[in-house]
Image (cartoon, rainbow, N blue to C red):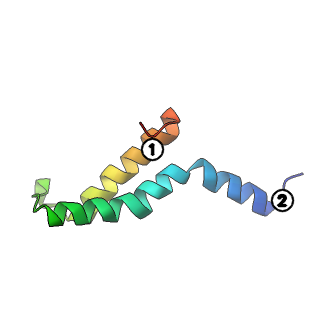
Amino acid sequence: MPTAIQSTLKALFAIGPILFGIAFMAPVLAELMVAADITQPFGLAPITLGLAIGGAWGTYTVLKGSWL
């Protein structure tokens, strides 16, 4: 019988790519856009666009099962 900790870790690992996309990729993408002086569409903040891209990429990864 799985414990609460095992169930929680299983759930976190299942959505790990989404967490990675939001927690790591979003700030990196935002900083890259600022460094490259890329203008964001609709006047969005760089982190907002980074969160959208990172979250979408993480969700795609979970659904497909592969990063590429």
Q: Please state which amino acid type lies under the numbered disc 2.
A: Thr
Position of residue 8 measured from the top left corner of the image (x, y, whole percent): 70, 59
Q: Residue 3 carries which label?
A: 2
Instruction: Tell me if 66 is positioned left or right of 56 in this view.
Output: right
Q: Which residue lies furthest to the top in this view?
A: 64
Label 2: how many Cα within 10 Å (few below 14, some 14–19, many 20+): few
In depth, the one of 55 and 25 nearer the eye is: 25
- Identified at 75% across, 55% down, the residue is 7
Q: Which mark is residue 59?
A: 1
Q: Residue 26 carries which label?
A: none
Tag 1's secondary structure? Answer: helix
Q: Please state which amino acid type lies under the numbered disc 1.
A: Thr
Give the vertical position of 67 relative to 24 (above or below): above
Position of residue 21 measured from the top left corner of the image (x, y, whole percent): 42, 54
Dot 1 or dot 2, earlier in sequence = 2
In depth, the one of 32 and 44 nearer the eye is: 32
- Identified at 56% across, 50% down, the residue is 15
- Identified at 47% across, 57% down, the residue is 20
Instruction: Tell me if 40 is positioned left or right of 59 in this view.
Output: left
